[in-house]
Amino acid sequence: MSATEPPAPASLVQYCAKTAAQSPVLKPEERAALSRLAGLDHQVIHERNRVALARLIDPLEAGSARWGNALTDSARNMLLMEVGRRSRAYWAYWAYWAWDEQVWTMFVASVTGEIRHRRRAHLVAWGYLFDRHRRLHHRVGMPKLRPLADFVFGHGAVDPALEQVCTLLERWETSPKSQPELVYSSVLDALLSAGSPHLKDVTLELLQDLVADHPASSARRRGFFKMSRVLAANGFIPEPLTGSHQQRGTRPETVASVPPEWLEMVLRWRKFSTNEPGTIRTKFPLLLVAGRWAAERHPEATSPQAWTRDIAAEYIADTVIAVRGQWAGHNRNRTGWGEPLSASGKAGRVDTIRSFFCDLIEWDWITPRFDPRRVLALRLSVRAGRDPDPRIIDDAAWAKLMAAALTLTSDDLRAYGTPRAKAAGWHANYYPIEMIRALVGVWLFGGLRMDEIRRLELECVRWDQATDPDIGETYRVCLLHIPANKTTAAFSKPVDPIVGELIDAWQDVRPAQPDITDRKTGQRRQHLFCYRA
């Protein structure tokens, strides 16, 4: 055992359990010693009392042997006084090593006053070591966790974890000014809750629970999000936290009106579907609509296997005359309810149910009773209503957009900071101006989808040369590499050289960033427009 490593909690718990089994109640000499101790004002325990209270004092002193704090003896006496009080009030529930979290919380919360308040870290550490109450510091509202972490894990045991997190966040330029008060406490809270001074022992599920325990405005909650990015970059957790992680999944009220047989098949399809995540999210509620329709019109066919050619044709006919909100189930957005479905809405429902049945038949989950490609088809007159409606930008508006993009400065962007800082004349932008300029340049001159812009690789620009056939002069050609997208594989396309110049300017000042998983290819790589991880 190293000089800074505390005794193993398991050995202390085993020792306490053994002594408790030998004598489950306080002995008369222990009660007398506790009574004598209550009448003393000093922290020293005389030898007579120490011998009588050996099974109570020895575990405490073994757990705090390396704390090296003058308040330890005082905190120990406070705990012994509580044992004596509880032995009189609760005859069979006196041992501090058997207290539940509620008892520890009530006891620690009762410690008031400035001097007595400084002993809370000692008491919480004992509750952690003996009863493994890893969230006790949160229950009693401890703002400073470093003393507690040193008591529990040993002096300096958490320093490598703190250094690793803060070093990466500084490299990524993730609010370095707030680290001492924001990130430190979050890392310590997570390590204490995990029961380990090592970052690899912090799980994604634990971080989600910790975030749920703190309000949205809590600085420590924001620190958990920053910490999760470091853990994900090091491979300790599969992905960092997101602001909507607690909203993931299906709400119970959404599926309450769907037949169980239909819902089971839809959930199974969602799990194994190879479609894009966004496509699955779009199709899922439309498949639930079909299940509710079946429950209303054909209660005998609430399973996809029970659908016949006639039922499928009837569903298409009802979809053509359906209105918004019909068979929608629980939906808080009631905008436009009762109005006829648009051509896109009708096509979306029909295309979704057709692809659903095609997948079920192809995967041998059901026995085909009709051809979904022929039966589940929308008539051409309805589908023709989906003709594209392009928005034409006139030349004057386009000229204004380009002029604004080419002359963009920091003063044109909304200031980032507190109202007091803004009133004092302080001005800063949340994102560097070089990044904004490159983003605007790609948007105006790249002709890309939003998803393609977000997923551009760091080294996406390649310069080439071409020769003018008329005058024979050479000129630079900027080739922009486009990642795999909705319809095609990765390719390169020529763009205006201003795009490459703006991207090169952003790459010159872009801080180091972690690799992020490309949601389409599944590969971890550098993204061009990644900032603050």
Image (spheres, rainbow, N blue to C red):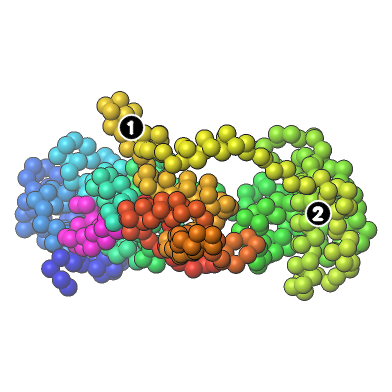
Decide which of 360, 390 is in the foreground and name it.
390
Label 2's element?
helix
N-terminal of the pair, mark 1 or mark 2, is: 2
Q: Is residue 276 above or below residue 424?
A: below
Residue 409 on image: x %, y %? 37, 38
Decide which of 451, 230 is in the foreground and name it.
451
Residue 116 on image: x %, y %? 17, 41
The crowding category of the residue bearing disc 1, from other C-alpha atoms within 10 Å (few below 14, some 14 to 19, many at least 20), is: few
Give how far apart the Cα atoms at labels 1 and 2 are. Answer: 50 Å
Q: Residue at x 76, y 62 (%)?
A: 356
Residue 369 on image: x %, y %? 89, 68
Label placed on residue 350? 2
Q: Quadrant of residue 128?
A: bottom left
Q: Residue at x 79, y 42 (%)?
A: 342
Q: Amino acid at mark 1?
A: Thr
Q: Residue furthest front?
A: 471
Q: Which residue is mark 1?
A: 418
Q: Is residue 71 left or right of residue 314?
A: left
Decide which of 262, 456 is in the foreground and name it.
456
Tell me, yes or no, if residue 186 can be seen here.
no
Q: Which residues are magenta?
A: 146-168
Most prominent secondary structure in the magenta stretch? helix
Decide which of 297, 450 is in the foreground and name it.
450
Tell me, yes or no, if residue 388 can be seen here.
yes
Q: Is residue 250 magenta?
A: no
Q: Is residue 353 left or right of residue 425?
A: right
Q: Amino acid at mark 2?
A: Val
